[in-house]
Image: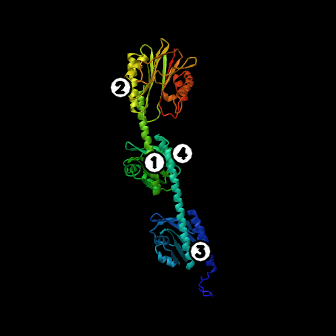
């Protein structure tokens, strides 16, 4: 149109059309500020529909490669909404056509709709005009806005252009919301993996580590998490966690009663054999019945509420060491390939932590078995002398060098000794066993502590061992009411007298074995009720502290040996002064004269 001055101008719109365009412009502004999919859905199905007078409005989004999901509807009755909640992209209708072509589609009148889609059942709604506009962004169609307006009148071209603009804004809003959600999810997952790495590195106990792996995922990513490890060709459940503590035992019972069948081509053993993840995105009751033919087993699984599950291998050093399984009982949480990738990231960290803990536990067990193999099964006293010992490994995987022993001689005297081989490992254990055997051998020739230590000094010098060894040898003589003691570079013993006084004994006569000769012994009166305590430096030494401070603590704690039960008293002494942060072994031996 041209005005009186010859200038082109837009034709005047009817008031209803102008009002509709104004409403569409306002809705476009709303969409640009939307922050959630639900908000976009509400704007499309309510405000857009009201702006154009549509009685039916839907927002449909493409799901995967070949499906469409209606994320919001208005005006459809419940059965129809359920029928079209999810449908194939191959079904002929306006929604799928616009998603495939990426072009707006307008159909005016029931006859044109029926001619376009003759096989599509259309409820009798009278004359209609349908407008379906694509939600396009970055050259692809994310979904569509579908509107159904009563009457057989074609929409105003200007209104259609506004709808196209509105659809573009909606598509950008959905893309922005999706990108924001992905970023938030990735940030959350990266934070979780960082926290998990710290948690997994905080323990070398395999049971504790496995329990932490299971507990980390619940409830953030799973309602139920299980850790299974491969041992002797079979899967053994190491840990399980559930959002409902009462169902943990139910999950354990399900596994124990029906463990994974190695012969089955699917399931957890398939993950072990192939090293490939297993995803069950949607566990329907039909799927459960096919997987679990046993009625009792099926009933337990139903009680656990299995809705979706994934299992990924615990891969370490190129082999599958176990399986990490997540199970969802929530209808709103269905696992997908992204969840599998994330679970694999966690599984890699978990596999290393579990494997390290397992290796540490095995090595520590071997070390402790070796340590105990070269230590006496028990120390022996007599009716006159009661003997008790305490040994505590550092908890590390290397064998320590603390050793001790006590045994009676045929004449009623008792020999006791406590020593410490400096260093750790097999060499220290070998030296420890050699020294303990050598002491017994030299005692069999001459039981005097001087003779025993002199023989050891000569032996160490002759064999030129690189191991430094400290040693206290004690000969308890009831006939002469005394102890004869020789100390070769070791921590000084302490005596608790019957009257409760303490007597620190002289410090070592010279350096460790092999570095001196002609050592002098000392005689210490030792009557009924007196108690001798000999320890290794692991009990008294602490970092950045003079040894005198540790010896003072020992002297203050010796009175705990007054307990009628010497073993209990010795445990109390050790417990009162040991350093929980120490990485050194400790040994202690108490000898009490009873009469």
Residue topped by disc 3: 52
Horizontal and vertical percent position of residue 1: 59, 85
Q: Residues within 10 Å of mark 3 (few under 14, many from 20)?
A: many
Q: CA distance from mark 3 to mark 2?
A: 103 Å
Seen from this angle, which residue lies furthest left? 463
Residue topped by disc 1: 349
Mark 4 or mark 2: whose residue is earlier in sequence: 4
Closer to the eye: label 3 or 2:
2
Please state if 273 lies on the left or on the right of 64 as rendered.
left
Q: CA distance from mark 4 to mark 3?
A: 53 Å
Question: What is the secondary structure assignment of the residue under circle 4?
Answer: helix
Give whichever of 67, 391 is nearer the camera.
391
User: Badges 1 and 4: C-beta atoms under 8 Å apart?
Assistant: no
Question: What is the secondary structure assignment of the residue under circle 3?
Answer: helix
Q: Residue at x 62, y 74 (%)?
A: 22
**How many numbered discs?**
4
Q: CA distance from mark 3 to mark 1?
A: 55 Å
Horizontal and vertical percent position of residue 320: 39, 47
Question: What is the secondary structure assignment of the residue under circle 2?
Answer: helix
Question: What is the secondary structure assignment of the residue under circle 1?
Answer: helix
User: Badges 1 and 2: C-beta atoms under 8 Å apart?
Assistant: no
Q: Which mark is residue 77?
A: none
Mark 3 or mark 2: whose residue is earlier in sequence: 3
Residue 330, can we see it?
Answer: no
Give whichever of 412, 153 is nearer the camera.
412
Q: Residues within 10 Å of mark 4 (few under 14, many from 20)?
A: few
Horizontal and vertical percent position of residue 184: 53, 57
Residue topped by disc 2: 463
Above or below: residue 33 compared with residue 272: below
Closer to the eye: label 3 or 1:
1
Q: CA distance from mark 4 to mark 2?
A: 62 Å
Residue topped by disc 4: 245
């Amino acid at each position: 149109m041209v005005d009186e001055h010859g200038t082109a101008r837009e034709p005047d719109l009817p008031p209803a059309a102008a009002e509709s365009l104004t409403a569409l412009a306002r809705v476009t502004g709303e969409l640009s500020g939307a922050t959630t999919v639900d908000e976009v859905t509400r704007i499309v199905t309510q405000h857009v529909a009201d702006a154009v007078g549509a009685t039916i409005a839907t927002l449909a989004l493409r799901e995967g490669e070949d499906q469409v999901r209606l994320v919001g509807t208005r005006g459809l009755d419940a059965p129809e909404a359920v029928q079209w909640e999810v449908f194939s992209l191959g079904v002929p209708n306006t929604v799928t056509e616009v998603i495939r072509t990426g072009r707006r589609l307008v159909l005016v009148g029931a006859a044109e709709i029926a001619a376009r889609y003759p096989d599509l059942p259309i409820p009798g709604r009278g004359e209609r005009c349908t407008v379906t506009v694509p939600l396009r962004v970055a050259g692809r169609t994310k979904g569509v806005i579908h509107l159904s307006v009563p009457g057989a009148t074609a929409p105003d071209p200007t209104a259609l252009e506004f709808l196209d603009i509105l659809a573009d804004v909606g598509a950008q809003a959905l893309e922005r919301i999706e990108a924001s959600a992905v970023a938030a999810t990735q940030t959350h997952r990266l934070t979780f993996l960082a926290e998990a790495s710290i948690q997994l590195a905080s323990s070398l106990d395999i049971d504790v580590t496995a329990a932490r792996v299971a507990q980390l995922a619940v409830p953030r990513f799973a309602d139920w998490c299980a850790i299974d490890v491969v041992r002797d060709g079979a899967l053994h459940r190491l840990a399980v966690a559930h959002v409902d503590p009462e169902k943990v035992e139910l999950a354990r019972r399900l596994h124990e009663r029906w463990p994974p069948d190695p012969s089955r081509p699917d399931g957890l053993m398939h993950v072990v054999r192939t090293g490939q993840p297993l995803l069950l995105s949607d566990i329907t009751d039909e799927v459960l019945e096919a997987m679990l033919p046993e009625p009792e087993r099926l009933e337990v699984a139903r009680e656990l509420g299995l809705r979706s599950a994934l299992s990924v291998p615990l891969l370490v050093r190129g082999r599958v060491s176990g399986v990490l399984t997540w199970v969802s009982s929530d209808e709103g949480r269905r696992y997908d390939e992204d969840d599998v990738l994330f679970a694999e990231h966690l599984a890699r960290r978990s596999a290393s932590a579990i494997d390290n803990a397992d290796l540490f536990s095995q090595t520590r067990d071997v070390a402790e078995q070796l340590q105990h193999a070269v230590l006496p099964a028990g120390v022996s006293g007599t009716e006159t002398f009661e003997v008790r010992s305490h040994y505590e490994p550092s908890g590390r995987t290397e064998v320590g060098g603390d050793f001790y022993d006590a045994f009676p001689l045929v004449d009623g005297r008792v020999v006791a000794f406590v020593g410490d081989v400096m260093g750790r490992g097999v060499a220290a254990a070998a030296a420890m066993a050699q020294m303990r055997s050598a002491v017994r051998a030299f005692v069999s020739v001459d039981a005097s502590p001087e003779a025993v230590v002199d023989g050891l000094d000569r032996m160490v010098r002759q064999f030129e061992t690189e191991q430094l060894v400290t040693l206290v040898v004690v000969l308890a003589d009831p006939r002469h009411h005394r102890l004869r003691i020789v100390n070769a570079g070791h921590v000084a013993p302490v005596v608790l007298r019957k009257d409760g006084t303490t007597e620190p004994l002289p410090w070592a006569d010279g350096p460790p074995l092999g570095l001196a000769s002609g050592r002098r012994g000392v005689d210490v009166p030792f009557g009924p009720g007196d108690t001798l305590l000999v320890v290794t430096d692991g009990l008294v030494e602490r970092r950045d502290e003079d040894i005198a401070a540790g010896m003072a603590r020992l002297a203050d704690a010796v009175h705990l040996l007054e307990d009628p039960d010497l073993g209990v008293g010795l445990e109390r002494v050790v417990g009162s002064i040991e350093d929980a942060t120490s990485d050194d072994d400790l040994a202690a031996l108490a000898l009490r004269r009873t009469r």
